[in-house]
Image: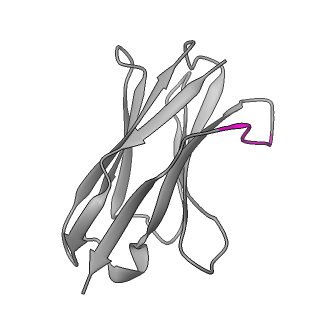
Amino acid sequence: QVQLVESGGGLVQAGGSLRLSCAASGRTLSGYVMGWFRQAPGKEREFVGAIIWSGGAIFYGDSVKGRFTISRDNAKNTVYLQTNNLKPEDTAVYYCAVRLVRSHEYSIWGQGTQVTVSS
């Protein structure tokens, strides 16, 4: 069973950057997709991006394209979300989650990390 732990959130001024981490333990992520999502108060959960562990294909949501970058460290079984040029509307709890490549459902979620962007 995969377990996920996010870290790296915090308070930053508009235009600033944060690097979020999602460390996976329990098994290798081969055969999985790791996704990043965010949810702001009163809003629906939003897809931020995802990486297919085997092969490394990466996808981004429209609202973060060009500002956020997903990368990974195979040795650490960790995925990073580099967030640049942050805006107040990026304020949310950020979650990482995994699903099997052949599945449509993200079945395992981390606890989330808060990102707050001040104007």
Against 84, residue 22 (above or below) is: above
Tell whether 1 sits left or right of 3: right
- Which residue is nearer to you in this view: 106 or 110? 110
- Which residue is nearer to you in this view: 51 or 13? 13
Figure coloring: one colour
Name the quadrant of the C terminus: bottom left
From where the camera sits, is residue 84 visible?
A: no
Question: Magenta-highlighted stretch: main secondary structure?
Answer: loop
Name which residue lies at 54% across and 26% down.
Answer: 53
From where the camera sits, is residue 111 visible?
A: yes
Task: Find residue 44 and report its horizontal and vertical position in percent.
Answer: 67, 72
Task: Find residue 66 and report its horizontal and vertical position in percent.
Answer: 36, 64
Task: Find residue 96 and report its horizontal and vertical position in percent.
Answer: 53, 44
Find the residue positioned furthest to the front. Answer: 111
Name the quadrant of the N terminus: top right
- Region of the chain picked out in magenta, as a range: 104-108
Task: Find residue 90 and report its horizontal and vertical position in percent.
Answer: 41, 73
Residue 109 location, quadrant: top right
Against 19, residue 107 (above or below) is: above
Residue 15 location, quadrant: bottom left
Tell whether 35 sits left or right of 11: right
Name which residue lies at 32% across and 78% down.
Answer: 87
Confirm whether the magenta stretch covers residue 36.
no
Find the residue positioned furthest to the bottom. Answer: 119
Name which residue lies at 36% across and 51% down.
Answer: 69
Figure label count: 0
Name which residue lies at 28% across and 60% down.
Answer: 10
- Which residue is nearer to you in this view: 13 or 33? 13
